[in-house]
Amino acid sequence: MFKNRDQVPPGNEIMASNAHLPENKLFPPNSHRNMPPVLQLAKKVGNKAMTKLLQNQRQPSMPVIQRKLDPDSLNKMKADKPDRYGKKDFENAVGDDGKFTDVKADKGLPTFWGLLKEVYGEENLNSSIFHFTKELGDTCDRPHSVTADITKNGWNSERDPSGLVPAIGNLGYEESLIRDGNDKHRVASYNGGHLVGYQILRGEQADQQWNVAPQDKKNNQESYNNTIEVMLRGARVGTKYEYTVELQYDQYNFSVDQDQLKKRGILKEIDSDKPWEIQLPVRIPFKWDAKALMINDGQFGSPTNGTASYDQYSQTMDETNLDSAKAETTARYNLWLADEKDDKSLFDKDSEEFNDLHWVKNIHFSMHQALPTDRKKNKNPIDWKGEEGKKTAFYGDVRKGRAANSASSLEKAEKMLEQNKHLIHDIEAIEDVKQPEEFELLPKREINRQIGDTKKGFFITRLHNCQIKNEYQKLRDANEEWLELFSVQREELKILELGKETWNELTTKINKEASPVQIEEYILSLMELKRTLLKIKDHRESRRLYKQVVDTNYPVYKEKFEDCMSKSIIEYQRLVGLKARVDELRVEEESLDKQIKGPKKKLKRDDQENKKIQAKERMEVLLKELEILENEIQGLENLQNSYSRVTYEVFLNGK
């Protein structure tokens, strides 16, 4: 009855995430095609998690759905060179007053939720802390700079609420909590701040991950909003200008250990099976630098007069004045204005020079904001008994800003050798399970044979009452995510053996005698090997999870399903029986009615009266029974009709 008939339609095969990579010459050639086994596997298997991630990067507005983060993809946490987005990545981000022309950002960096969940397990996280940022999914871009061309065409636009902006603002809160803890003296907090403002672009297209970063709350709502942004929003209609906003980060990532995470209430328990220390990507920029260059003979607006807008104003931008415990110094900013010759003047709201700003052709806003501080970490792990080799999760080193020096090629190669060694050991420690017996999740042929349209309502009602959706949806999701991975088990086993041979070969070649060119070639080979090993590890874990889900849920699902079928048939037969009984009683009712009105044959008066009395008494009992039966029939018919227009798939896939 339950056989698996799910097949992947032609053309819907998962594309390999690394299919475009160059051939790795160090791997043995394939017997039928001169291609390294790494790429053979990539083409045949693909990596579902990375495919989804890449799709989401192409469509930033879509929610990120990523089952498994690939550590190799997280090297971008180092951010030595931010990704430059191509035109196609932002060509649809066009508002009523302008469009983006250049974007630089670290694409798809893991969120704190995504990375901590991946490394330490969702069950060990206090998920309520990440309530707002879960909307971002497991990854979110980290902006470095954006440029937009603006032509002032109108005035303020109505703005629909967007969950993206406060979610990114809450990344700032989470970073502060992880690094500083709940510091009762800290008043610095963060909003999601647009680089190019919503009202400047005039449109919701400004709500892009690469155009929003955590910004000091007071600065966002007052200083930034009421100086350069109000000048741009208030520009005369027809004014054209190029607007560039750059962010700088004091460091690109920071290190945190399990003890800190537990003290901050993020981890429930210290887990010796997980790495003691991990690096997380910094989200709070240290510097904002915004420049507007007028292109035509237009006119900017003027800053507002409110005193609160200038609480954080600083002529010297002395960074020692930053103080996270005082609202006026959680950020410091200044504002430079320039004429068409680019002669600059530092803005002073009390100077008569700035009463009339028709001469201003360029605007420059600089802002520094107080950052969380890394508390002194434990030199030795506390309550952690894990292996020394697994002490640190390799998600990038702690790197300082743009001045960070990259490791030498030899050191990088040796580090990658060690990473691949651990990956091989991890893979071999995972039991590669066999595929469970095939089953059909929704046996339509059997349903149509036994149920059909006449019993459909009873059947779906029973499915609803037995709460079968939970098991169905777990099995459905497992089939969609993991079932196809059993088809590549043999190939993966062969490639794992080839990968071990390649690793052994490279350990002998990577040494001080190797030339820089050779080292770079070896690094490329190690990167290919690492991608494949991560893919094999992911697939083994996924197959194990699939078997676990099926073994746990399918017996329960099958029992419930068959029980619902049999009971719905019984319920339908009961309805048929009730209707037949009603028909019998209607015939008897007609006979009694004739007796009450008077028998056709002449009887003695006493006998005639007795017959009428008996008929009336029986009629009362009969009518009560009819009423009960008809109410029951009506209830059963309502059940039958309640789901008459609902398909089984719609019902089972619904919430």
Image (cartoon, helix red, strand yellow):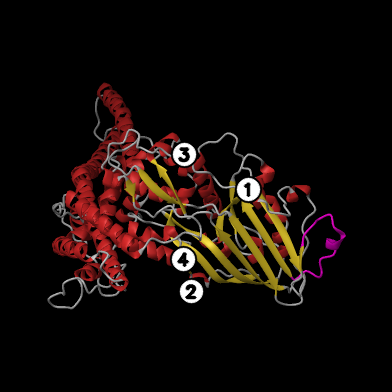
Identify the residue position indicated by label 3 in the image.
376
Q: Residue at x 40, y 54 (%)?
A: 397
Asked whether the beta carbons under mark 1 and mark 4 sit within 8 Å of each other, the answer is no
Give the structural element (helix, strand or loop) at label 2: helix
Disc with the residue nearer the chain's start (1 vs 4) = 4
Disc with the residue nearer the chain's start (4 vs 3) = 4
Q: Nearer the viewer, residue 304 or 415?
A: 415
Q: Residues within 10 Å of mark 1 (few under 14, many from 20)?
A: many
Q: How far is mark 2 from mark 1, CA to CA?
A: 32 Å
Q: Is residue 502 above or below residue 308?
A: below
Identify the residue position indicated by label 2 in the image.
88
Q: Residue at x 78, y 55 (%)?
A: 304
Give the structural element (helix, strand or loop) at label 3: loop
Q: Amino acid at mark 4?
A: Lys
Q: Residues within 10 Å of mark 2 (few under 14, many from 20)?
A: few
Which label lies toward us, 3 or 2?
A: 3
Q: How far is mark 2 from mark 4, CA to CA?
A: 20 Å
Q: Is residue 181 above or below residue 517?
A: above
Which label lies toward us, 2 or 4?
A: 4
Give the structural element (helix, strand or loop) at label 1: helix
Which label lies toward us, 1 or 3?
A: 3
Image location of residue 67, percent across then percent down: 33, 54
Q: Amino acid at mark 3?
A: Lys
